[in-house]
């Protein structure tokens, strides 16, 4: 439920901070005072579409913040986790929406940036705003079905249908992937066989490409390498006058003769002799290398051809031997699958038949349960509607499995379309006046009638959980007297299990509020501002009197107002 609401620079509201309690809060005020602005601000933070026109004149940005209590709402916790949003402290949720004239608005949940779509998704879980038609979620047939399932305690059976549908869908998709037409299957088989054979014929060895590139480099530069090797061996070994190896030995012998005069020279003698040994090893290895080294144009051609083949395969199947071989394994697996496709199709067809039968049984049970729950819900709702001014209204909950020749499931020799929610279309119908054919709820013309119908629905489904905060606007359109009093009582009844906020012009409704706010316009320093004032006891008497008799407020009106407030 809403705990606090902070509005800044939205339309005529420069700054507003409201603490909202549970129970029933009524909002009154003169026509045009700004009650709709207050609801518009709340709608912003619930993900409604924003416009720069909502920003107060002379300001560059506007913002709305709402602090909400979210205890015992596991579905909301899962939603926050799915979007990577923090759960918040003390089981609360802080939602903020900023809009700017530049169009670069921002949304936050518990201080983390998010999107308008996420705010809308959260808002649908937390606040149900019944006013203009586009805000009334119960006009959607999917919501009507959800309400019926929740009211009838059908959630578990519906989950079983959803799980069965998911299994059947996975099986059908697997079969459809295999069910290529024969010509396409043959073409794919030929292609896969060619690819596997081409890679197998190459007999690729891991690490071969790097070895071949090194060998090609050596063979392509054989002449230069031979000349350089000759020069190095001449310096180290073959030229007597400059041979490094022999020179190091002579130097060590000469220096050793001086050790008897200075023992420190022994260390350097050792270094020279060690260098002589290392040079000797290097010379021996270079001699072996040089003896086996020769230019081989024929081998170079073979290496070049092999590299060309590997590069050709690389362009088609992968840049490395590993990638080419991995492609080969994948193609071979697909080839094997297509080669045994008939067997797999037969297996999947049998599996699909079993799954379809199981789903049909669960969907049929859910449909029958919905039909029974729908009749009971319609009876309960008709009773509530009579107390709300629909004296002879007819209400129906129509549950109809959707027939479809191509449907996945069947019973009673009929095929039906099925989704994760079952096979039924659920729709609420109402005939508010005698002699009229009941029409879909979504086509009910009067906003006031629709709000009262929503109120009745909420009253009968109050025990089914759902959205914790309900806001009603235009609920008193076209009613008065006894009906208005009945509406007020129903709102008070609903407020025992929900947080309820209602905008009204009728004292018969306003008197039931546990909290009462007045919306008014004030002019300060030449600028108009909308202000919301929570009323104390005596102030409330005055406002009820104004609703009863208008202004100026008379003593008779005040007396009548006190009587209304005292009479529950």
Image (cartoon, rainbow, N blue to C red):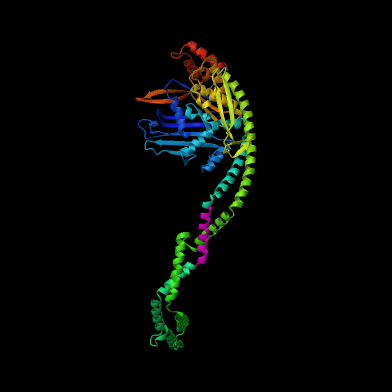
Q: What residue do we see at 51% from left, 59% from top? A: 327
Side of 402 where 282 appears, left or right = left
Along the line of sight, the residue nearer the viewer: 376 or 40: 376
Q: Is residue 367 left or right of residue 192?
A: right
Task: State whether residue 505 is above or below residue 415.
Answer: above
Q: Is residue 485 above or below residue 368?
A: above
In the image, taking residue 349 as reference, residue 297 lies left or right, namely left
Nearer-the-camera pick, 343 or 284: 343
Main secondary structure type of the part rendered in magenta: helix
Question: Which image quadrant for residue 232?
Answer: bottom left
In the current view of this chain or complex, which residue is farthest to the front? 183
Residue 192 place in picture, x, y as percent: 52, 58
Q: Give the magenta range.
A: 185-207
Is 205 covered by the magenta stretch?
A: yes
Is 559 covered by the magenta stretch?
A: no
Write the residue at 40% across / 73% down.
220
Residue at point 56%, 40% (across, down): 78
Along the line of sight, the residue nearer the viewer: 435 or 153: 435
Residue occupying the far top of the picture: 556
157 left or right, relative to 531: right
Question: Horizontal and vertical percent for residue 199?
Answer: 51, 63
Q: Position of residue 429 (x, y in %)?
A: 55, 25
């Amino acid at each position: 439920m809403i705990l606090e609401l902070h509005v800044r620079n939205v339309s005529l509201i420069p700054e507003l901070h409201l603490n909202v309690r549970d129970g029933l809060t009524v909002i009154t005020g003169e026509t045009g005072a700004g009650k709709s602005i207050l609801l518009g601000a709340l709608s912003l933070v619930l993900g409604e579409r924003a416009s720069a026109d909502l920003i107060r004149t002379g300001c560059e940005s506007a913002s709305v913040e709402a602090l909400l209590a979210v205890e015992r709402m596991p579905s909301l916790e899962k939603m926050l986790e799915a979007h990577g949003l923090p759960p918040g402290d003390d089981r609360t949720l802080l939602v903020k929406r900023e809009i700017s004239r530049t169009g670069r608005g921002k949304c936050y949940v518990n201080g983390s940036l998010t999107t308008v779509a996420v705010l809308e998704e959260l808002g649908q879980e937390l606040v149900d705003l019944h006013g203009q038609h586009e805000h009334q979620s119960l006009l959607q047939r999917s919501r009507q079905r959800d309400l019926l399932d929740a009211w009838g305690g059908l959630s578990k059976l519906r989950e079983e249908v959803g799980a069965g549908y998911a299994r059947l869908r996975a099986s059908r998709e697997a079969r459809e992937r295999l069910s290529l037409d024969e010509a396409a299957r043959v073409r794919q088989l030929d292609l896969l066989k060619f690819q596997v054979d081409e890679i197998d014929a190459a007999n690729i060895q891991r690490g071969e490409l790097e070895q071949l590139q090194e060998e090609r480099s050596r063979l392509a530069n054989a002449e230069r390498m031979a000349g350089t090797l000759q020069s190095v061996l001449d310096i180290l070994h073959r030229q007597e006058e400059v041979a490094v190896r022999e020179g190091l030995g002579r130097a060590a012998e000469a220096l050793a003769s001086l050790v008897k005069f200075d023992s420190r020279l022994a260390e350097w003698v050792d270094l020279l002799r060690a260098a002589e040994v290392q040079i000797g090893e290097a010379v021996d290895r270079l001699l072996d290398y040089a003896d086996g080294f020769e230019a081989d144009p024929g081998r170079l051609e073979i290496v070049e051809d092999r590299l060309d083949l590997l590069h050709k395969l690389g362009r088609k199947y992968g840049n490395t031997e590993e990638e080419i071989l991995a492609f080969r394994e994948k193609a071979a697996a697909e080839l094997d699958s297509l080669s045994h496709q008939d067997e797999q199709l037969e297996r999947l067809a049998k599996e699909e038949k079993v799954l379809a039968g199981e789903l049909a049984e669960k969907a049929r049970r859910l449909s029958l349960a919905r039909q029974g729950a729908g009749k009971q819900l319609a009876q309960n709702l008709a009773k509530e509607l009579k107390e709300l001014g629909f004296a002879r209204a007819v209400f129906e909950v129509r549950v109809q499995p959707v027939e479809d020749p191509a449907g996945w499931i069947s019973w009673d020799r009929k095929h039906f379309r099925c989704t994760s929610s079952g096979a039924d279309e659920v729709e609420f119908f109402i005939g508010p006046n005698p002699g009229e054919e009941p029409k879909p709820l979504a086509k009910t013309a009067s906003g006031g009638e629709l709000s009262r119908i929503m109120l009745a629905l909420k009253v009968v489904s109050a025990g089914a959980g759902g959205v914790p905060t309900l806001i009603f606007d235009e609920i008193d359109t076209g009613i008065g007297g006894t009906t208005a009093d009945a509406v007020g009582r129903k709102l008070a009844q609903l407020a025992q299990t929900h947080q309820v906020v209602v905008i009204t012009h009728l004292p018969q409704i306003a008197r039931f509020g546990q909290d009462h706010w007045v919306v008014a316009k004030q002019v300060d320093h030449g600028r108009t501002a909308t202000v919301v004032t929570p009323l104390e006891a005596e102030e409330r008497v005055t406002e009820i009197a104004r609703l009863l008799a208008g202004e100026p407020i008379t003593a008779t009106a005040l007396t009548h107002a006190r009587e209304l407030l005292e009479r529950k």
